[in-house]
Structures are given as C-alpha cells and as structure tokens.
Image (cartoon, helix red, strand yellow):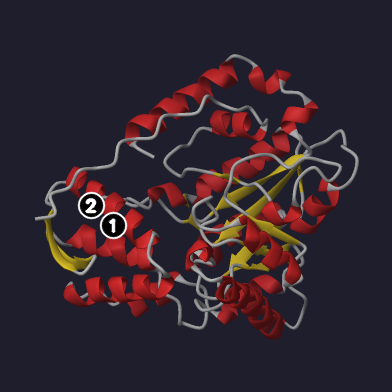
Amino acid sequence: MSADNRWLRSARLELAFFSGRTLTASRATAGAGVILRFERVRPRRKGPFQPLKQAEIPPAFLDKVIRALKRWDYDIVSLDEACDRSVRLAQSRRFACLTFDGASKDLITHAYPVLARHGVPFTVYVPTAFPDALGEAWWLALEAVIAREARISLVIDHREQRFTVFKPAEKYELFAYLWQWLRKLPPGELSLAIRDLCSRHSVDLAALTREASMDWTDIGRLAADPNVTIGSATVHYPMLAHLRDADAQREIAMGKAVLETALRRPVRHMAYPFGDPQSFRRSDAVLAEQAGFVSAASAIGGVVQSEGRTHLHMLPRIAWDGRSRSLRALKVLMAGVTLPREKSAPQPKLDLG
C-alpha cells in the first residue's frame, strides 16, 4: 500500500470512529468476535529506511491493545474457544483472539513478558524449518541488502540488472519492486534469487534468519504455558499458491507432523504463510482440513461470525499495520465497519538499465 493510500485509509478510519459507527454497528456487522494478527514485537528502530515496519509493533503498543480490549469488554480467548464460539449462537460479549505469525525471536524476548503479565491466551504459528535453522527469511535479507548498499545488482528474468539507490525514497521503491518480483517466484527460484543477492552483497542469510528466529528451546518454553497455543505455519513458509497440490500438501502435513513430534501433543491449528489472497488458494483450505487441522487462518481482514457462518479453514484476521498507533482505528476495524475500496496505487517505474 502506498503512503498516500495508507494515510487516506487512516483518515477514513478516524472519521468512522468519530462519526459513531462503532457504536451503531449491528451484531451481524460486528460478528461474534475477531482474531488479531501480529508479526514482530520489538522496540522502535531508528533510521529512515524501514520497509518492514508495518509488520512490527513495540511492546508498549501491545500492552495498550490488551488493556483496550479489556476496557472495551472483549473476552480475550484462546483459538480453540474462538473456533467454538464461531459455531455457536451469538453471545452478548464479543471475543478477541491474539495470534502471532512467524515465530520470531522477539516474540519470546519482548512480546511474551507483556502477554504473561496480563495472563491472556494467545497463539503462535511456527514454520518448523526456522527453529531447525533451515529456513530462509528472504524478506529480512532483502531489507538488509537495500538498507546497506547504494548500488545493487542481481539477475531478474535471466538478465543482469543494476540499481542505484542513495535516497530513502529510492530504496523504498526498489524494495517494493523486488518484493513483488520475489513473491511471484516458485520457492526454488526464490531461494536461488535471494541467495544470489546475499552472496553478491556479503549478507549472511543463514545467520540473519537464525538470529531473528526462535529455537526449539524458546518454543518449548511457550508450549509449557497453558495460555499458549502452538500452531503450524508449514515447514518453509512458502507461497502455497506457487506450489503444486502435492507439494502444498506435503508442506502443510509435514509442518503439523514436525511440531507434533517436537511437542508430543496434537497441533490443531495452522496459518497460511503470508496469508493474503495472492499467497494461497481455496484448494489449500481443503488440504488443511484433510491434514487434520481444526482451523486455518488467513491474513484476509474481517470479523468471525457465529452459527457456522465463518469457514474455519479460511479464518479472517485483522492484521495490524505497525506504522499506525491509533486504537481508535483498531476499534473501527474490530467493529466490522467496512470502508470504501481504495484505488490501487500505480506500479513504480524503475530504471532497469
């Protein structure tokens, strides 16, 4: 989302709050409750180039969200309870379920102390290759290369491409361009491309990924807490939409099997890697159900309806943009208020010479 569209959306959310639409939202609109999706929780970073800031919130904001949920009379529930309420008759109090994608190291260092202090249940979705130090956080490597370098080269569509990016605006434009390009590649080609980029610019992809990811000791510590639900996010965190059905089925089933072996307990829930409509297919929901998952969560916005009106293997979640600190905007989204659809931002025009 472009900066202009983001600020316009924020303004619309604020306007919706002050217009009283959160108070007049009907039960049908507001649903039975919401599932909130977060990724990284860590202190604010300094620096003009932070393309992944939208996936980060500071611990203090997480604390504010939990306090606000209690103040707004939400029941903060486990994912099992959220799924159970979605098939029952509507209750007078709505629920909120907290979920965290990616199993990043800062979850245990910065988020867990806040969550434990409040004593609230939450879910962590783990891509099992990462605690085994076999995953590749290509998005972190892309950010690291562009942040450090002013001249960047790589092979795109079998052609050597070179970019010169000194200014933060140029770096953001290049990041958006390469992010979209990498996301369209099959997993094998994406891995080759990011390894090539890291090799050219002396970025240690394995070390970067390992430092940012929880290990099995961290996951075991969380699993020992009865307030924590451990879910699967496949093995390698691929874009399932780019896999053949057999390969997608293997990723989904193996993610579950590895976790169950490590934790010695059933794993009932999963999240689609990235979770947006371009990253997985409806057929993947069938594969998740066949693998024995009770639910599968997306990153597609929306509220959870009662009486079975929400597909448990296409669970909507409200993904919070870490660049915003407005609890008012969050309350509007949680009330199920819909905004006019925004026009897509034009694709950036980069000099590929």
Q: Do the CB atoms of the residues marked 1 and 2 lie less than 8 Å apart?
A: yes
Q: CA distance from mark 1 to mark 2?
A: 6 Å
Q: Quadrant of the C terminus?
A: bottom left
In the image, residue 114 sits, relative to residue 124, either above or below, namely above
Residue tagged by mark 1?
A: 178
The percent position of residue 250, horizontal first and vertical second, equals 60, 78
Label 2 environment density (alpha carbons within 10 Å; few <14, some 14–19, many ≥20)? many
Report the residue at 51% width, 62% height from top. Answer: 241
What element does badge 1 sit on?
A: helix
Q: Nearer the viewer, residue 307 or 130?
A: 307
Q: Residue at x 48, y 37 (%)?
A: 325
Task: Give, as a three-letter code, the residue at label 1.
Answer: Leu
| Whether residue 268 is visible | no
- In the image, 315: left or right of 342? right
Question: Badge 1, how many Cα within 10 Å: few under 14, some, many 20+?
Answer: some
Residue position marked by numbered label 2 in the rendering: 174
